[in-house]
Amino acid sequence: MPPRRPPIEFAAAITRREALRGGFALAALAAVRPRRLFAAAGGPTADKLIVGKDARLLVHNPSTTGFEIETPLELLREDRITPTAKLFVRNNQQPKWSATIEPAPAGPWNIDITGMLEYPRTISPAELRQMPQVEHEMVLQCSGNGRAMFSKSSPVKGAPWEHGAMGNVRFKGVTLKSIFEKLDVRPDAAAKFVTAEGAESPGKPGAADFEHSLPLNEVLARSIVALELNGEPLAAVHGGPVRLVTPGYYGTMQVKWLSRLRLEAQETVNHHQAKRYRTPREPMTPGAEFDYGLDNSDPHWRMRIKSVIFAPANEAAVRGGAVTASGVAWNDGTSRIDAVELSLDEGRTWRRAELERSGPYAWQRWQAPLKLPRGKHTLVCRAVDTLGNTQPLDGAIDWNPAGYVWHGADRVTFEVDA
C-alpha cells in the first residue's frame, strides 16, 4: 500500500462568507407554540467553534479535533434545502484550518487513485472543475442520528443525537465514473471495493486514521467527487476542497478532504470500517455487549427508510382542533417512497399523508390536516417504499451498543387547547 500522504496544512487566512444562499421555506407551521431551541449547556456555541455556523445549533462535543454539532428540529424544519450555516457537523478528525463554512484555503491538492489497477493516477480539483458537473439533492445523515432514542431502552455510547444529525442539501461535482473514464482507470477484475482516505490526521496519538471502504460497483453507479455544497464552493468544515459523496449512503461514508482512492479486493480492516460504524446482523438484547467484526456485522452503506415529524413539535401546545401535521421521509433512493402513514392510536389504524415528490435521494415532504379534540394526543409516523420496506413501531428492536442506524417510527406527544 502506498504511504499515506501527510496532512496538508495551509497558512492562508480564513474569512467569514458575507452571506449564504437561502433555501426554500417549508409550509407555515401555524397554530403551534414551538419548544425552546436547544442551547449548549455552558461552553462555546457553534458560531464560536466554526466560523459562519448558526449560534443556535446544539454542541455535543466542542473538541477541535472532531466536532459533534446537531441541528435542532426547530431550525431544520425551516428550509427545504438546509443552509450550510445550519447543517450539522460530525467530524471524527479534522484539519486545523477547517473550522469554517468558508471554502478551504488555496493550496496544492491532488486525489491519488491507487491499488488494483495498471498504474496510479492523480487528478486535481482544478482539473475536476473543467469536467462536466452533476448535482444531487440528497439527505446527508450521520448513522448515529436518533441514538438518543436507543438510550431509552438501555444506554448506548456516543453523542446523544436526536433528529438533527441530518440535513437536506445539494452536492455538485464530477461522477467517479467520468473520472475513471478520463484517466483510463481500469480496475483489476478482483477489485470489489474503493477505500477512501481523507487528508486529515487522527486527533489522538496512536489512533487509527479515518478511512472507509465502499462497494466498487455502487460507487461507480452513484458517487461524485463533490466540489460544491448548496451552490457554493465546498465548505472547509464539510470536507472542502473535495469530498467523496455517494447519494443514499450514511454520512460517515461521505469521506471529507478526499486525498486518495484505493481499489481493493476486500474491505479495509481499518478500525473505523471493521470495528466502528457497523451494526450487528442479529438482534441484540438491550444492554448486551458485542465484539464487532467484518464477519458478524454490516457497514453503514445504504440508509434505511425513515421519516420524521416536523410539526406538531413534541410537547407543543396547539391552539384549536385543526392541526396540520408535516414532516419528511426518505430512504436510500433505490426505490420510491410509496406512502407516509400516520396513526393517532399507537398503530391500530393508519391514514396516509399527502406527499410532495422530490428527487430519489432527497427528503420527500409530507403533510396531513388533522381535526382533533381538546386534550393530549400522540402522533406516530412511518414511511413505506415500493419494495415494502417500512419503519418498525418499536425502533428499539434494532438496539446496538453504539446506537447506530435508528429508523423506528417517529412519534410526538402534544396537547390541543381551546
Image: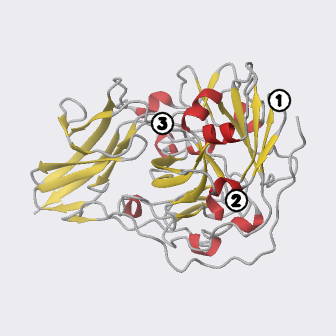
Rendering colour mode: secondary structure
- In the rendered image, residue 149, in percent from the top left (x then y), is placed at 46, 43
Residue drawn where x is 79% and y is 46% of the image: 122
Amino acid tagged 2: Ala
Residue drawn where x is 58% and y is 40% of the image: 223
- In the rendered image, residue 87, in percent from the top left (x then y), is placed at 51, 60
Question: Where is residue 233, by image quadrant?
Answer: bottom right
Q: Identify the element where label 1 is drawn.
A: loop
Residue drawn where x is 83% and y is 29% of the image: 118
The mark lying in front, picked from 3 and 2, is: 2
Q: Identify the element where label 2 is drawn.
A: helix
Instruction: Tell which of 132 and 71 is nearer to you.
Output: 132
Instruction: Tell which of 413 and 19 is nearer to you.
Output: 19
- Dot 3: few (<14), some (14–19), or many (≥20) neighbours within 10 Å? some
Amino acid tagged 3: Ser
Q: Is residue 303 visible?
A: yes
Taking 416 as reference, is 86 left or right? right
Q: Which tag, 3 or 2, sits closer to the chain's start?
A: 2
* Figure check: 100 above or below 276: below
Q: CA distance from mark 1 to mark 2?
A: 24 Å
Q: Which tag, 1 or 3, sits closer to the chain's start?
A: 1
Question: Where is residue 234, by image quadrant?
Answer: bottom right
**Mark 3, residue position:** 153
Amino acid tagged 1: Glu
Taking 91 as reference, is 251 left or right? left
Q: Quadrant where the N terminus lies?
A: top right
**Mark 1, residue position:** 118
- In the rendered image, residue 190, in percent from the top left (x then y), is placed at 74, 19
- In the rendered image, residue 324, in percent from the top left (x then y), is placed at 18, 54
**Mark 2, residue position:** 126
Q: Which mark is residue 16?
A: none
